[in-house]
Amino acid sequence: MSSVRQQIEAQLKQRILLIDGGMGTMIQDYKLSESEYRGERFADWQCDLKGNNDLLVLSQPQLIKEIHLAYLEAGADILETNTFNATTIAMADYEMENLSAEINYAAAKLAREAADEWSKKHLLNQGMSPVSWDPPIGRALFLPMLTILVIAT
C-alpha cells in the first residue's frame, strides 16, 4: 500500500474529506470576455476561445489560482485541477490539440502552488471527462504533483 493511500485512509478514518466545487461555475462568475480568455499569448488565435475554461490555466493563471485558494479557504481538502476538457479530443474544438499536455501540466502546477500556499496537507485530484479520455494525454496526467485521478461524470 502506498504512503499516499495510507495517508488518505488515515484521514478518512478521522473525518470526511471535502473536495472543492465546480471550476466551471466559479469561472462563469467572472463573466470573462473573448479577449480575457485569449490573454496575450493567444490574442491572435484563429478561432474563438471564449468558453475554453481549461485554457485559462495558461491565459489567466492568477484567476484559476484565486479560485483554488477560495475553495481552500472554504474548507476543501482536495483540489481538482482545471482540466475537465484538457484532452486533445476536447481541445480540437479550439484547434489547440497540441496544447493539451501543457494545459494539464500548468493546471496541476497551479493547484499544487495553491495547496502549498495554504498548507501542504491538501491533496490534488486530476479531474477529467469520461467521454474525452485520451490515452496519449493519460500518460502525462500522472505527474508527481497529483495525488488522485478521478474520472468525472
Image (spheres, rainbow, N blue to C red):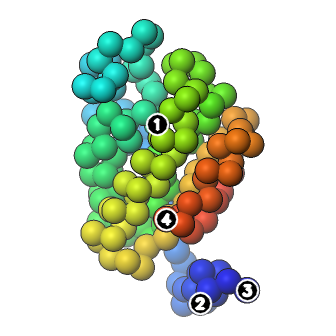
Question: For the residues marked 3 and 1, what is the alpha-carbon distance in whole angstroms?
Answer: 33 Å
Residue at the image position 27 percent from the left and 69 percent from the top:
117
Question: For the residues marked 2 and 1, what is the alpha-carbon distance in whole angstroms?
Answer: 32 Å
Q: Quadrant of the N terminus?
A: bottom right
Q: Nearer the viewer, residue 106 or 149?
A: 106
Q: Whole-percent x and y of residue 102?
A: 48, 41
Give the amino acid at mark 3: Met
Which residue, given by chain and number where applicable, does mark 1 sit on? 54
Rendered position, 61 above or below 3: above
Question: For the residues marked 4 and 3, what is the alpha-carbon distance in whole angstroms?
Answer: 19 Å
User: Which quadrant would residue 74 be assigned to in this image?
Assistant: bottom left
Give the amino acid at mark 2: Ala
Q: Which mark sits nearer the N-terminus, 4 or 2?
A: 2
Mark 4 and mark 1 residues within 8 Å of each other at the beta carbon: no
Tell me the SS state at disc 1. helix
Closer to viewer: mark 4 or mark 1: 4
Question: For the residues marked 4 and 2, what is the alpha-carbon distance in whole angstroms?
Answer: 20 Å
Residue at the image position 29 percent from the left and 18 percent from the top:
43
Disc ID at residue 1: 3
Tell me the SS state at disc 2. helix
Which residue, given by chain and number where applicable, does mark 4 sit on? 145
Rendered position, 37 above or below 83: above
Q: Which mark sits nearer the N-terminus, 4 or 3?
A: 3
Tell me the SS state at disc 3. loop
Give the amino acid at mark 4: Met
Q: Which mark sits nearer the N-terminus, 3 or 1?
A: 3
Q: Which mark sits nearer the N-terminus, 2 or 3?
A: 3
Q: Is residue 11 left or right of residue 120?
A: right
